[in-house]
Every structure is written in C-alpha cells, then in structure tokens.
Amino acid sequence: MVRKDLFELTTAQFHSLLVIGIDVASLAASARRAGYHVYAVDYFGDLDLKRLGCENRSIIKQQVGETCGQLDKNFSSETLLKLAKGLHRRVEIDAVLLASGLDDCPHVLSELHDLIPILGNRPSVIRGVRDRMRFFKELDRLRIPHPETAIVKNTKEAKREAKNIGYPVVIKPSKSFVGAGIRKAENPQELGQAFQEVTHLDGAILIQEYIHGIAASASLISGVNGAFTLTLNEQLLGMREMGQREPFGYCGNVVPLQVKKAVVGRCKGIVERVASHFNLVGSNGIDFMISEEGVPFVIEVNPRFQGTLECIERTLNINIVKAHVEACVQGRLPTIVNNPLAFCVRLILSAPRRLVVPDLSVFKEVRDVPLPEVVIEKGEPVCSIIVEDKRRSSALKKARTVAKLIYRNFS
C-alpha cells in the first residue's frame, strides 16, 4: 500500500482516520461525528469503541474473569505501533490523530509518521516541546514564567538542586503520563525517599520548583494564522476518594476553569505565544500551575488531543476533530464559539481494590466502559463519568453521586 505524503493530503478529501493512544474512545466518537471512517488503536479496548462500530486493535484483550493488567507494566508504545502496522496492512488510512501515550516516544512517532502521516504536529515539533530542558530554555527567552527545573541522575544531585531551587520541590520522571510517579518533598529526607520511589520509572528525573496554586490547562486550536484558546480547564488531581493512589494522579477536569478575567487573559496570551513560537498546529493542550498571585506558570505542552475533548465539545457545542482538520489542512481557526453556559466535569474512577466490574453501561453518564465481569487491579482506571450543570459545585456533586453509586455496585 502506497503511503500518501502530506502535500497530497492537504489537497485531497479525507475519508479514513486512525486514532491512536492510551484511551481514544472520545476522540473516535468525535471523528465519527465529523463524518470520517474511523480505525482505532489503544490500550484499554473498552466497549465504547466497539459500540462506535470502529475496527479497533487494543493492547488489553478484555475477557470475562481475566485481569485488565496494570497500565505502567503492560502499556507499550511499540505495541501500539505494531497494532497500527497490522491495520495499515489491511486497510487504507489517510491520516493519524494522536491521543495521549506517545508524546515522549520520538522513535515511535517518526516510524508511525513514515507509515501513515500524522495530521497535526510533526514528530520533530513534538520532540521539541517534550524535551523539558530545551523547552524551558525557550520559555526563558520568551520571558514566560515556568517552574525552575533541573535534571538529576542520583540522590546527591537531587538534594543539591533542590537546595538551589528551594523547598518544597516536585520530583517527577521526565517520561510520565496521567501524573504517575510525581512526588512532593518538603525537606531533604522526604526528597531521598521520593527519589527512590521515582527511579524505577524510565527516563531522567526532574527536580522542579513547587508552585502553590491551581492546576489548570488550556485547550487550543492553532494553525498558520495563530492560535485560538477554546477553554481553560481545571485539573482534578490525586483524588483518593476516586481510588487514585498517585498524589498527583490525573482524575479528570472541570470545564471551564473558574478564575478572574485577568488570569484568563494572561493564560490566553501565553497560549498564543507558545503556539506561535513552537509552530504548533491543530488541537493542543498546555498545562499550567496558576499561583496564588494569579500568575500562570507553564508546566508542559501536550501536542495532541486532550482528555478534556468531550467536555469541551459539550460546553461549546463544537466538533474538535472538525476544527483540528480545518486548522491543519486549511489553516482555518474557529471564529464563533459560544461562551460556556454550563460546567462539564469528567471524573475518572479507579479501583479501590482488586475487583470484578459489573455492567456499567446502565449508567448514562459513564464513558470508557469496560466489559462486564473483567478484573480491574487496585489503583487502575475503571471508567469515566461525564456530567453537566450550570454551577461548578453542582456538576462536581453530580459526578461524585454517580461515582458513589458505581462504587456501591462493587461491594
């Protein structure tokens, strides 16, 4: 099968798309609603993809009575690539849409792009924004605030850099997703313990200034004509009542972020400068910590579709994949976007213990639905809940109520 190059794709109509990443159900659904024939490669293989009618390949083969494994042990970017190659041998696919999971795998992205063109940021662009130290040096040149950061190899270096930065600090692996392995240290003793917990993960270790404030993100569409910030989003992290064991583990979002207009303006200004400087195209995300003084500190760029996708589509009544394609192919940015009239919450539930999953399809608010009677290991994701309400507090309350009902089904 002959691979089409990017020039051909910019002058031809798209028909088929491959969505690939750890969790692609919401992205696949958006692509289907935009009118594309969708193929999917992911980690979980949840029922959502099967109900969409997508031809999909998954790392986990969900079977009644069998475990769904552990994400940090069973996920492999190389396996996702292998599954994509298998699909490519059978069917013609015009382009790839990236979800999370491949951001820090440049060799896999390059090989995938050579196989099927990635519609969005090229692998070289992704590599540039995900190289933390290079990225922060560029932010310094742009005079954009970010946490002071150092790369270390051992505990001695970690303690030296932490002293220079000033406690408290954050210890994190350079290659991480969903907040796994991130720890906070208030003193050298806690730093030593945290460093030992993180070193078993792949990649270099970062020592980073801890910013007191609100964890947030920006979801944007960018192209040759600039960048458009769709929403600012509140990040939900480390919610132990949702079964999350990681202190900074990703538990979902509230869309939009509820902050002062001045803070919104600062964030949007940074978003446009970052997108332009790093030549970002299509759907991208930028993570911030917004300090108690209202200063946005850039944490990282997520150069692909984000977990906020369905919440944004519901609050703004737009199709993210359609906007992404128009930005990448035609350079067109969204021009008329309704102001959010409600808050949308995505809450990710994790297993409080090793458990057998009941039929969760009875809950209309549930996404990422596993096969009934599969085994979920302690701390692993079970499903997502998505709800809306006119007030942030009410939307969160609704989501927590559904979560409690689901947890009762486990007992």
Image (cartoon, rainbow, N blue to C red):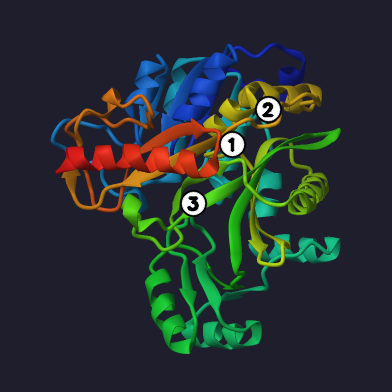
Among the two numbered marks 1 and 3 on one chain, the one whose residue lies closer to the N terminus: 3
Label drawn at residue 324:
2
Image location (x, y in percent) of residue 175 = 51, 58
Nearer the camera: disc 1 or disc 3: 3
- Asked if residue 80 shows in the view, the reply is yes
Tell whether 192 sits left or right of 118.
left
| Residues tagged 2 and 1 counted as in contact (Cβ below 8 A) | yes
Nearer the camera: disc 2 or disc 3: 3
| Residues tagged 1 and 3 counted as in contact (Cβ below 8 A) | no
Among the two numbered marks 2 and 3 on one chain, the one whose residue lies closer to the N terminus: 3
| Residues tagged 2 and 3 counted as in contact (Cβ below 8 A) | no
The vertical placement of 143 against 376, above or below, is below
Q: Residue at 80% of width from left, 25% of height from top? A: 335
Q: Amino acid at mark 2?
A: His
| Spatial separation of the CA atoms under disc 1 and disc 3 | 18 Å
| Spatial separation of the CA atoms under disc 2 and disc 3 | 25 Å
The vertical placement of 220 against 48, above or below, is below
Q: Which residue is mark 3?
A: 236
Residue 110 appears in which quarter of the rendering?
A: top right
Q: Amino acid at mark 3?
A: Leu
Q: Residue at 13% of width from left, 35% of height from top? A: 65
Q: Residue at 78% of width from left, 24% of height from top? A: 336
Label drawn at residue 334:
none
Q: Which residue is mark 1?
A: 305
